[in-house]
Amino acid sequence: MKEILNYEIWGNVVTDYVYALAVLIVAVIVIQIIKKLFINKINKTEGSGLLGAKFLIRSISRFVIPLFYLGGLYLAMNFLEASEAVTQVLKIIYLLIIVWITIKGARAFIEFFVTKYSQETGKEEDVRRFRPLVGFINVVFYVIGILFILDNLGFEITTIVAGLGIGGIAIALCRTSNSRRSF
């Protein structure tokens, strides 16, 4: 048995794989328990408060729980040795997934609040009126996400941010000069 546990596969002994698998299984079990407890607690509130229970449950299931699973996988992978190239690729994949889930979650919250606002005011046309703003905010989220990814990958983003700031000022000045001509 000891020979099997000390057998090396891709630079790791079988024991390392067993530890990684055990951490992953424990993480999944803990996440499932927390998920059940949290969702049961939210269901008992019956949607009272600012956020509805259905929205919270759906948001937690779609955005928070996948991040926890990703964290569990990350912890499990720490028990394994990998080459620098594999480690870098995994870092990029983790980063992309985290940014993607975060952006999707932020978009869902904004769309929820716009819908909730229009329902509370009784003006369903407000949803259409806010679509350009929501679209702009989505673009801003993606730009921030891309800049975050580039910064974490070691790129120098200060020049990009400065360029975006100068570009924004130039667009604002052009729009201002065009609006004065129309008077």
Image (cartoon, grey):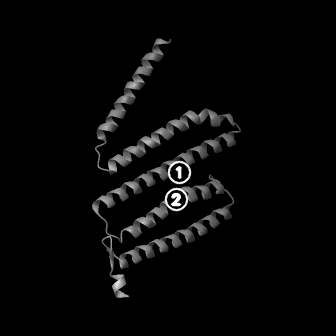
Within the image, what quadrant is residue 36 found in?
bottom right
- Which label belongs to residue 105? 1
Decide: marks 1, 2 in contact (CB < 8 A)?
A: yes
Q: What element carries label 2?
A: helix
Q: Where is residue 2 shown, x and y percent of the image?
A: 35, 87
| Kind of residue sitting beneath label 2 | Val
Residue shown at 37% from the left, 79% from the top = 15
Tag 2 residue: 64
Position of 61 relative to 37 (above/below) = above
Residue shown at 30% from the left, 40% from the top = 158
| Kind of residue sitting beneath label 1 | Gly
Q: Where is residue 62 shown, x and y percent of the image?
A: 56, 56
Q: How many numbered callouts? A: 2
Left or right position of 91 against 25: left
Within the image, what quadrant is residue 37 found in?
bottom right
Q: What element carries label 1?
A: helix
Q: Where is residue 92 shown, x and y percent of the image?
A: 37, 54
Q: Where is residue 145 shown, x and y percent of the image?
A: 42, 46
